[in-house]
Image (spheres, rainbow, N blue to C red):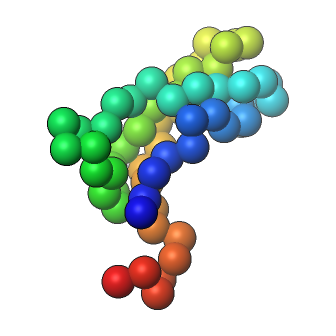
Amino acid sequence: MLEPDQQITCIDCGGRAFLLTRPREDGVWEDGDIVAYRCEDCLDRWDLVLEDDDPTDY
């Protein structure tokens, strides 16, 4: 099942960036969904596209 990380490393400052985006009402994340993160140190926002890393997961 595809699910974004709750925390990533900020690309600018190396701090912790936390997931802002909530899942749909059905709780399902899909390939191509856009998720947003906010860094707790520099306050930068990162918008990332979810991609299914496992090509055998059909």
At 33% from the left and 51% from the top, the residue drawn is 29
Q: Indicate the quadrant where residue 30 lies.
A: bottom left
Residue 1 position, x and y percent, is: 42, 63
Marker count (numbered): 0
Q: Nearer the viewer, residue 26 or 11?
A: 26
Residue 34 position, x and y percent, is: 36, 43
Q: Is residue 30 above or below residue 8?
A: below
At 73% from the left and 12% from the top, the residue drawn is 41
Q: Is residue 51 above or below residue 16?
A: below
Given the current orientation, which residue lies at the most extreme left position?
25
- Picture quarter with the C terminus: bottom left
Q: Indicate the quadrant where residue 26 lies.
A: top left
Residue 24 position, x and y percent, is: 23, 39
Q: Nearer the viewer, residue 23 or 50?
A: 23
Given the current orientation, which residue lies at the most extreme bottom position?
56
Q: Is residue 7 above or below residue 30?
A: above
Residue 48 position, x and y percent, is: 47, 44
At 34% from the left and 61% from the top, the residue drawn is 31
Residue 24 as seen in the image, left or right of residue 1: left
